[in-house]
Image (tube, grey):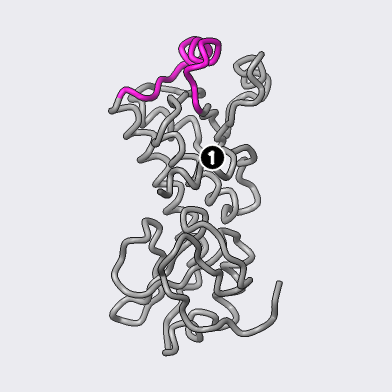
Amino acid sequence: MSGDLPEAYDDEKGPLRRCAVTREQGQPSQMIRFVVSPSGVVVPDLDARLPGRGIWLSARRDVLEQARKRGVFARAARCQVTVPEDLPAQVEVGLHRRMVELLGLARRAGQSISGFMKVREWVTQRRAGVIVHASDGSRDELGRLLSGARDLPVVEALSTEDLAKVFGRERVVNAALAAGVLASRLCCENKRFSGVADGGSRVRRTFPADGCEQAGQ
């Protein structure tokens, strides 16, 4: 990772953004945007829609920590700013919430189902675009669910409690989303979350990068 001081804001035009820490370019949908509030506080802009020029970082916890500790935000903003000590945790919680909301949106749109048998049926019929398996679920059960379709992407960032609240049931371990925009968006949030989540989170498998690019279009 480069030790050079970050340059001023990049122009937020074009298909790529530059990380203020690593100086690497990436797709906006795979990075985290921050803005400085009117009161001078650095806040995450996970939807990349808040007014003001953004400070972009790679979706990695070590990058967020380095930006917080080394004055990257103040240098990029060219002014004094307040950086909350829990900024990485704010990003993690926010991305987790976005995944729950996306799954709920998919359910209301009729693009997701839950329950082992229903999900398994979608898998065998090749209707599933992504599987959501509870972080506290059984690995053996996941193996049975994916039998014959091991290439399906799996999101394991949400708990059985999270899934139960989305589907209005007492306990949910497995869910599936139909292939499409919502599934791709969930992939992107899962990919970002997996980069910034604290070490104990079980998030390993995601959509390929092109799925995230599609969601960001």
Q: In the image, which residues are magenta?
A: 110-129
Q: Residue at x 53, y 13 (%)?
A: 120
Q: Residue at x 29, y 70 (%)?
A: 51
Answer with the quarter of the image where residue 207 lies.
Answer: top right
Secondary-structure class at tag 1: loop
Residue 216 appears left or right of 207: left
- Please name the residue that numbered disc 1 is placed on: 157
Residue 187: image location, x then y, percent: 50, 40
Instruction: Determine which quarter of the picture holds residue 63.
Output: bottom right
Where residue 171 appears, x then y in whole percent? 44, 23
Viewer-side residue, 21 vs 137: 21
Q: Residue at x 56, y 58 (%)?
A: 59
| Dot 1 amino acid type | Ala
Badge 1: few (under 14), some or many (20 or more) residues near its Cα, within 10 Å? many
Pick the residue in front: 116 or 165.
Answer: 116
Q: Residue furthest front?
A: 14
Q: Is residue 75 above or below residue 36?
A: below
In the rendered image, residue 62, in percent from the top left (x then y), is placed at 64, 65
Residue furthest bottom as drawn: 79
Judge left or right: residue 175 versus residue 148.
Answer: left
Residue 91 on the magenta segment: no
Report the front residue among 214 and 56. Answer: 214
* Residue displayed at 41% across by 70% down: 12
How many dots with numbers? 1
Quadrant in the rendering for residue 178: top left
Question: Within the magenta stretch, is there residue 126?
Answer: yes
Q: Is residue 141 above or below residue 183?
A: above
Q: Nearer the viewer, residue 85 or 156?
A: 156
The N terminus sits in image quarter: bottom right
